[in-house]
Amino acid sequence: MEKKEELQMVLLEFVKRGNCFTQKTREVLLEYKKLGGTQNDVVKVLYKMKEENITNQTVQHAVDDILDIATGYCGIEMRVW
């Protein structure tokens, strides 16, 4: 399985649970980065998830939480890139 597909599956499971502005989400992103994944790849995956779930506000908010971490719109202790 490709890194992006695996990342999408893991993040989708997190998104289904709701709040994703967590240390566990950050750890997943750090592992993805360690394996050579880029910030741009993560952002693309997240925007795709938003587009596929445009009417689901729970998904929209959870993905926004992950985007905050992935793009650095968070405190330094949560940043990945």
Image (cartoon, rainbow, N blue to C red):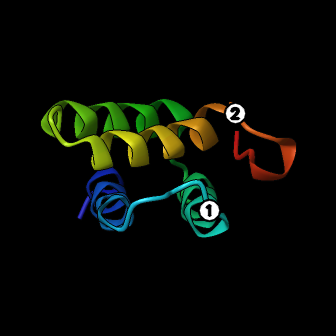
Residue 16 falls in which quadrant of the image? bottom left
Q: Which residue is mark 1?
A: 22
What numbered label is drawn on residue 72? Answer: 2
Give the structural element (helix, strand or loop) at label 1: loop
**Sequence-first tag of 2 and 1:** 1
Residue at 73 percent of width and 38 percent of height? 74
For label 1, count other residues whose C-alpha is less than 10 Å away and answer few (under 14), some (14-19) or many (20+). few
Amino acid type indicated by mark 2:
Gly
Between 4 and 62, the residue placed more toward the observer is 62
Residue 60 x %, y %: 32, 39
Residue 64 x %, y %: 46, 37
What numbered label is drawn on residue 63? Answer: none
- Asked if the residue at tag 1 contacts the one at tag 2, i.e. Cβ–Cβ closer than 8 Å, the answer is no
Give the structural element (helix, strand or loop) at label 2: loop
Residue 2 falls in which quadrant of the image? bottom left
Q: Nearer the viewer, mark 2 or mark 1?
A: 1
Amino acid type indicated by mark 1:
Thr
Between 2 and 15, the residue placed more toward the observer is 15
How far apart are the two marked residues, 2 and 1, measured between alpha carbons?
14 Å
Residue at 63 percent of width and 66 percent of height? 27
